Image (cartoon, helix red, strand yellow):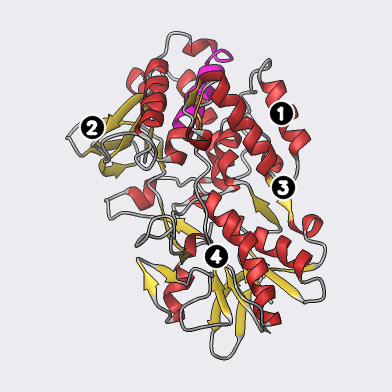
């Protein structure tokens, strides 16, 4: 059995298979040796969590799975073969009886002049660490100059995309800069401006309007410039032009517009639905009984809403990963496969500090109750590092983050990439 990708879907598929099919040979192909818990990535960028807290070791958690580090470059569906390139450029191949495609998604890049050159995405540990350094650097450079225009530009941060990621990045980032200002006396009277823009008519457009209203209220109270029905029209190294005509001097464009399925899907010559592989309710790819697809790369029918497919969320990916493990084992045994059916348990948005918006089981919450539910859910969902994560949270409630740049990742290493899997 070969699993491609170790995101939420792939990781939980591998975990499940090593339990329900202990005699099978399971191979997992992934570019890194860790599972990344993406929902907490904004807290890494804001210095609340250390990066290793949300990186769960695959060899440690999957002892009975053969991990192959690399990027899959070709799949022969009919010939039951897969090819990948490892981090040192060496090519390898393997055969499979069952294939689970869980390659995830990549940044969705829109044809806006300058965005590919000057924007930075937010889908990986590298991008989060770069953003943390970049924010710190801009404030320190602003503190070192007497040029008012340059200082204002360096203290302006623009986030495009007000879904989960963009809203949380703006929320955590604004608190991060506010805390850093206390360590930079030269900026004592300087305004630090955060802009959050989206073409939608409200924040968090895919969630309940009450959660959107809570998030907007919290951000506006903190001074975040929330702009709905507006986006970027043109990007330059030191300035942005918005779709309503305003020019914003800034050195910081953070791209959180959304994702699209991994381009690997395009080369498979299999039926797709808006770029995602078409699968049956049992997660079997249409016309290929030996191939399964889950997560962001799969258009899984949503039986709770006939005619639609499940959203590209971690909640669906995790549960599809668990089910596909059982269905792969059942297909080998000639047993009946289960259909995927999942009712949303609610959504959580961490707004930093003591603020969150949540609706567990449809119950709307905000403030401290929502924060308790949000952090409790994340601790339960993390496959490891729970004690360390909780410790970081505790420490950061009483001690500010240090204004320190590591300089480990340069801007050229995190160019906005829409080809590498997340």
Task: Indicate the position of residue 65 as horizontal and vertical percent values.
Answer: 77, 68
Tell me the quarter of the image containing the N terminus: bottom right
Q: Secondary structure at mark 3?
A: loop
Mainly helix, strand or loop, the magenta region? helix
- For the residues labelled 1 and 4, the Cα–Cα distance comes to 30 Å
Q: Secondary structure at mark 1?
A: helix
Q: Residue at x 38, y 67 (%)?
A: 275
Assess disc 4: are there few (<14), some (14-19) or many (≥20) residues with their C-alpha within 10 Å of its C-alpha: many
Q: Nearer the viewer, residue 59 or 360?
A: 360
- What span is colored magenta in the figure? 170-184
Horizontal placement of 368 versus 193: left or right?
right
- For the residues labelled 1 and 2, the Cα–Cα distance comes to 39 Å
Task: Indicate the position of residue 370 as horizontal and vertical percent values.
Answer: 54, 25
Horizontal placement of 276 versus 370: left or right?
left
Assess disc 2: are there few (<14), some (14-19) or many (≥20) residues with their C-alpha within 10 Å of its C-alpha: some
| Circles 1, 3 touching at the beta carbon (< 8 Å) | no
Q: Residue furthest front?
A: 336
Q: Which residue is mark 3?
A: 383
Q: Which residue is mark 1?
A: 392
- For the residues labelled 4 and 3, the Cα–Cα distance comes to 19 Å
Q: Decide which of tag 2 and tag 4 comes sooner along the chain.
A: 4
Q: Nearer the viewer, mark 1 or mark 2?
A: 1
Q: Secondary structure at mark 2?
A: strand
Q: Which residue is mark 4?
A: 103
- For the residues labelled 1 and 3, the Cα–Cα distance comes to 17 Å
Q: Is residue 220 above or below residue 4?
A: above
Q: Which residue is mark 2?
A: 247
Q: Nearer the viewer, mark 2 or mark 4?
A: 4
């Amino acid at each position: 059995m070969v699993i491609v990708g170790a995101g939420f879907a792939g990781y939980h598929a591998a975990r499940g298979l090593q339990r329900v099919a202990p005699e099978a040979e399971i191979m997992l192909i992934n570019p890194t040796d860790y599972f990344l818990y993406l929902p907490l990535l904004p807290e890494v960028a804001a210095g609340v969590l250390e990066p290793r807290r949300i990186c769960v070791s695959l060899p440690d958690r999957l002892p009975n799975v053969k991990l192959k580090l690399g990027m899959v470059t070709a799949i022969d569906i009919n010939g039951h073969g897969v090819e990948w390139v490892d981090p040192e450029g060496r090519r390898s191949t393997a055969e499979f009886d069952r294939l689970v495609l869980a390659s995830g998604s990549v940044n969705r890049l829109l044809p806006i002049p300058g965005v590919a050159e000057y924007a930075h995405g937010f889908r990986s540990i590298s991008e989060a660490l770069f953003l943390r350094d970049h924010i710190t650097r801009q404030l320190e450079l602003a503190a070192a100059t007497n040029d008012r225009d340059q200082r204002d530009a360096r203290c302006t941060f623009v986030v495009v995309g007000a879904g989960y990621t963009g809203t949380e990045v703006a929320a955590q980032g604004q608190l991060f800069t506010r805390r850093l200002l206390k360590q930079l006396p030269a900026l004592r009277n300087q305004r630090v401006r955060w802009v959050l823009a989206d073409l939608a008519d409200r924040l968090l457009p895919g969630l309940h309007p009450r959660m959107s209203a809570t998030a907007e209220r919290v951000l506006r109270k903190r001074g975040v410039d929330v702009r709905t029905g507006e986006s970027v029209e043109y990007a330059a190294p030191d300035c942005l032009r918005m779709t309503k005509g305003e020019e914003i001097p800034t050195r910081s464009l953070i791209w959180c517009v959304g994702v699209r399925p991994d381009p690997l899907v395009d080369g498979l010559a299999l039926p797709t639905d808006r770029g995602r592989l078409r699968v049956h309710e049992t997660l079997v790819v249409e016309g290929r009984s030996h191939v399964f697809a889950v997560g962001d790369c799969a258009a899984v029918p949503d039986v709770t809403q006939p005619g639609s497919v499940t959203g590209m969320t971690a909640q669906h990916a995790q549960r599809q990963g668990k089910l596909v493990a059982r269905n792969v084992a059942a297909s080998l045994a000639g047993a009946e496969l289960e259909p995927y059916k999942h009712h949303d348990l609610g959504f959580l948005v961490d707004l930093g500090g003591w603020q969150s918006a949540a609706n567990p089981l449809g119950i709307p919450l905000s403030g401290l109750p929502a924060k308790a539910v949000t952090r409790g859910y994340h601790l339960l969902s993390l496959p490891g590092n729970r004690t360390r994560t909780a410790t970081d949270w505790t420490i950061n409630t009483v001690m500010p983050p240090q204004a320190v740049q590591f300089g480990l990742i340069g801007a050229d290493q995190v160019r906005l990439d829409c080809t590498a899997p997340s």
